[in-house]
Amino acid sequence: DARVTQTPRHKVTEMGQEVTMRCQPILGHNTVFWYRQTMMQGLELLAYFRNRAPLDDSGMPKDRFSAEMPDATLATLKIQPSEPRDSAVYFCASGRDSGGYNEQFFGPGTRLTVL
Amino acid sequence: AQKVTQAQTEISVVEKEDVTLDCVYETRDTTYYLFWYKQPPSGELVFLIRRNSFDEQNEISGRYSWNFQKSTSSFNFTITASQVVDSAVYFCALSYGSSNTGKLIFGQGTTLQVKP
């Protein structure tokens, strides 16, 4: 049963520290999405990749956030420096974009707390 | 602009009652997809259903049914004979555009509490 995996599942850090979240998409999927969930904003798209190329990161604060796909099996979301307002659950999702419908499968999320 | 509105923030029902979760969407695109996801207390997002904009047929899956009406831009979700295990946050979402990149715009979610 293929699943999207995310590490760590929980992260507590202090303001100013660097945070790196990792995602392993489902093998064979060529699109990766990063979403953030907060009580105030709900679920919002931060960035997404197709074939490892970033296509849209308009939802991401550029000054402190960065998203990359070093290879097809790993996507990373980095926050440097972290701030308390970054506390949220970060979800990664992957899908296969074959020109038609592209269903997304979500990982379990990384719960980030910035003190 | 693309938008999904779930006007019901919280709903509380007693087990075995039927409950309908409302979803209204906005898009100028003629090709789009609508989704429902369930987020139980454990936090993961569970896919429930997808409909495309060209298929207005209602769908039933066990105790779950969905009513898609383009005329009112609504995609409502009904749970029949609710159970305690149905307690969760339910999200309606929209994916739009002819290229269908798969980007999802979520509603704010409806928290459903089913009491025994």
Image (cartoon, rainbow, N blue to C red):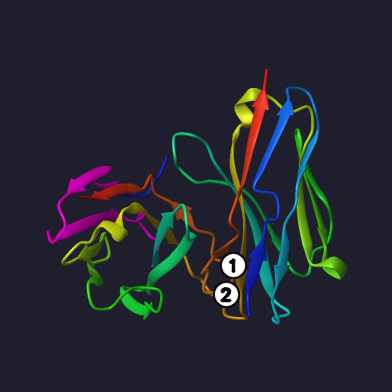
Q: Looking at the picture, tell me which residue is in the foreground, B90 or A31.
A: B90
Residue A20 is one of the magenta-drawn residues: yes
**Structural crowding at the residue carrying mark 1, measured as other residues with C-alpha within 10 Å and reported as few (<14), some (14–19) or many (≥20):** some
| Tag 1 and tag 2, C-beta contact below 8 Å | yes
Residue A9 is one of the magenta-drawn residues: yes
- Residue occupying the point 52% across, 74% down: B101
- Residue occupying the point 33% across, 78% down: A54
Provide the chain ID for the residue under circle 2. Answer: B
- Residue occupying the point 29% across, 54% down: A24
Q: Nearer the viewer, mark 1 or mark 2?
A: 2
Q: Residue B100: give its label.
A: 2
**Residue at disc 1, secondary structure:** loop
Q: In the current view of this chain or complex, which residue is farthest to the right?
A: B71
Kind of residue at badge 2: Asn
Provide residue A91's location: percent of width, then percent of height: 38, 54
Residue B92 vs A72, above or below: the answer is above
Would residue B61 be visible to someone looking at this image?
no
Image label count: 2
Q: Residue A101: give its label.
A: 1
Kind of residue at badge 1: Tyr
Q: Which residues are magenta?
A: A6-30
- The span from disc 1 to disc 2 (Cα, nearest Å) is 6 Å
Q: Quadrant of the N terminus of chain B?
A: bottom right
Q: Is residue B40 left or right of residue A80?
A: right
- Residue occupying the point 26% across, 42% down: A10
Q: Looking at the picture, tell me which residue is in the foreground, B54 or A99.
A: B54
